[in-house]
Image (tube, rainbow, N blue to C red):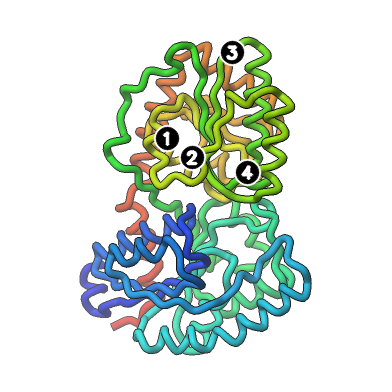
Amino acid sequence: FEVLIEMHKIKICFISHSSEKGGAENALIELIDILKTWGIKAYVILPSYGPLIEELKIRDVEFHVERYYWWLSGKLSLPNRLWNNILNCINIVPIAIKIKKWKCDLVYSNTLTICEGAIAAKLIGLPHILHIHEFGYEDHGLKFDLGEKFSLWILNHCSSVFIIISNAVAKKFRNYIPIDKLKVVYQSVNVPNQYINNNYDFFKNGVIKCIILGLIQEGKRQEDAIMAMSILEQAGFNTQLYIVGTGDSTYRKYLNELILEHNLKNNVIFTGFLEDPFSLMKNMDIALICSRSEGFGRVTIEAMKIGKPVIGARSGGTVELIQDGFNGFLYKPKDYNDLAQKIRFLYDNPHLAKNMGERGQEWALFQFSQLRYATDILKIIETLLPKQ
């Protein structure tokens, strides 16, 4: 790869779906960091100004803001969806011009929610990689504005390779994309070294401390965690649930109503967005992944690397990460009674919780390393560049 990179002096233009700092955005930053160590120069186009820009400035990554919109939506009206897609068609041209000006060798779009990078790459004759981090509808309730079949036809026509975050997500798109274009690559997940240790004393003072981290939205099903806490409290256990993240205000209101209804005001803590969630996670006993269909589950790996057992819904990409009984437990989706039983079992067997955390940590540190991720991505990039 070093010879390849020197020969081509590779430049990649990344198209980000947002300027915020969520799971997919963190994955993008980590990928840029990895590729930089191999001498690959990154440029980034974003749809707005936001926190992600500060991360790019820290890394001295050149960026450009050009307004564009998602072509997947959930609650937007039909006129708004049509108008956004008309604007996208107009904005593809300046995006293509910017990529051309940067003299990039390849265009790389981050998430399925945007199409501008794929079409711009086609217009100027560059290879395009689409990194799919999500199912779309199954996890976030999002639908293609132009219909799934037609939209994926466009992406297939304009893209050289689709990097898919898990086998579960890849399975969905095999009906629309040729198998030889689909490449499943588990992303690397970075956790600061100071949080990687096995000295934690589980269930101190008889308290069960759980954490659920991610967007507050119906698809993440924070309600399962709240209801499980209610069951445990009624059984006489002392519980604390930390809900980390921001999101849908309507769903947040529903969660607050559940908390009041089940007298959990002193047991459930909303922290909002945390710049450093690891400092809180290291003091938790169990991490919960309650999503109805998680594409991958970055938080799952973060918790494992910190040495925490993880209990997740038996759905989506979660079943590829949690080996039931080895590094955590799987529970029946939406069955908060089953979730409560799994939590109680770990409380009754703290030595098992510790062993699960240790096994998960060893597995995650090996499986989700930067070296493995960089190797997989570079192999794909190599196939798209002209041979010398």
Give how far apart the Cα atoms at labels 1 and 4 are.
Answer: 19 Å
Q: Which residue is mark 2?
A: 300
Q: Are marks 2 and 1 in contact (CB under 8 Å)?
A: yes
Q: Nearer the viewer, residue 7 or 306?
A: 306
Is label 2 in a helix, a strand or a loop? Answer: helix
- Amino acid type of the residue tagged 3 in the rendering: Phe
Q: Is residue 223 above or below residue 148?
A: above
Q: Is residue 12 above or below residue 194?
A: below
Q: Earlier in the sequence, mark 2 or mark 4?
A: 4
Q: Are marks 3 and 2 in contact (CB under 8 Å)?
A: no
Q: Which residue is mark 1?
A: 304
Give how far apart the Cα atoms at labels 3 and 1 are.
Answer: 25 Å
Q: Earlier in the sequence, mark 3 or mark 1?
A: 3
Give how far apart the Cα atoms at labels 3 and 2 are.
Answer: 25 Å
Q: Is residue 125 left or right of residue 176?
A: left
Q: Which residue is mark 4?
A: 220
Q: Earlier in the sequence, mark 4 or mark 3?
A: 4
- Amino acid type of the residue tagged 1 in the rendering: Met
